[in-house]
Amino acid sequence: MSTKRVFKVGSRESKLALIQSNYLVSKLQEIRPDVQFETVTMTTPGDRDLSQSITKIGESALWTLELENSLKSGSVDLIVHSLKDVSTSLPDDLVLGSILERANPCDAIVMSPKNHGHTLATLPNGSIIGTSSLRRAAQIRRSYPHLQIYDIRGNIDGRIKKLDESGQYDGLCLAAAALERMGVEYEKRTSQKAGCSEPVGAHSILKNGVLTLKGAVFTADGKEAIFDEETITLPNGLKGATEELRSGLKQYSCIVPGRGNEPRAFQAAETLGTDLADRMIKNGAEDILITVRKQIAAQGAGGI
């Protein structure tokens, strides 16, 4: 009697993380019905320490370290992350195996029941919006300076419970994709997505082979900002490429649905991102981030 091979999938144990991990498992199961997948859950520093803001405890591997250590030790075969939580520099012995089709990249506002029918623009002066993301906070401060931003931590259910029961918050700014995956309704969307520890945003659009990347960097108060964008037409495969070009291309481990895993397209997309980042740095983005990091360090030391 034959038994199925078992693959263990590492996941954070929060409700949203399990929804995302189980979705991936369902897709893998469709492709490989001959294989059994088991989800292994664990907590991370970001899950355990909810008393401090992300900027004070630092974001380096905040939601990924335990999962990555489990993968290295062989206790799981693959792990599932939200891409925004993944460090820009992966450990040398780990790779991104695949990226699922992108969900809604926007931010969303969930209003307190007492503010039903309001938008950010119509909330009374001094109304409080909760978020743990510096980038979201900066964007709200920039567009709606009459509002106050308070830090809020915890999983989606916990934050919404605080919104409903504490009376402290008038609304929350959260990821639209997270709310949609959990079946939560929301009233208004804002723009762009990035990590939580710095006020940086990026938004990419791929249409008919044309890739557009928009970037933004903000001061913590949102009063200063740098916006820029770059567009390229992605090359299609390696047709007509010389052997020298073929052999000189990077090897990309990431598999992107619908793109045919074309290394020239991956390379062009990477170049687009680095070129845009370099230009924004020259235009002052790095100076803004240096100032923000100093402010974060001062907060962690009990300063401003």
Image (spheres, rainbow, N blue to C red):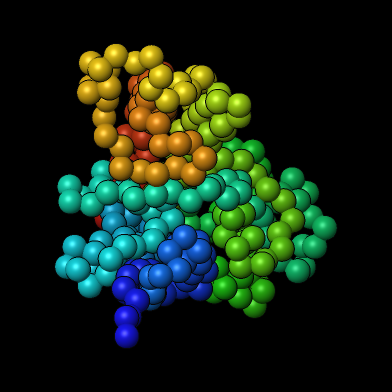
Which sits in the foreground, 172 or 75?
Answer: 75
Which residue is drawn at the image coordinates 64% and 78% (left, top)? 165
Q: Position of residue 276 (x, y in %)?
A: 42, 23
Quadrant location, the N terminus: bottom left
Q: Is residue 47 above or below residue 100?
A: below
Residue at 49% from the left image edge and 44% from the top image edge: 257
Tell me the residue at 40%/70% (across/down): 34
Query: Could you tell me residue 15's position as x and y percent?
Result: 51, 73
Q: Residue at x 45, y 36 (%)?
A: 260
Q: Is residue 277 visible?
A: no
Q: Horizontal placement of 248 versus 259: left or right?
A: left
Q: Is residue 77 left or right of residue 216?
A: left
The answer to whether residue 211 of the structure is visible from this angle is yes
On the rendered structure, is 186 left or right of 287?
right
Q: Nearer the viewer, residue 152 or 41?
A: 41
User: Which residue occupies the extreme right position in the image?
Assistant: 117
Q: Is residue 19 above or below residue 197?
A: below
Of 298 and 34, which appears nearest the observer? 34
Left or right of 68? Residue 85 is: right
Residue 292 rendering spot, x and y as whole percentages: 37, 40
What residue occupies the far bottom of the structure in this picture? Answer: 1
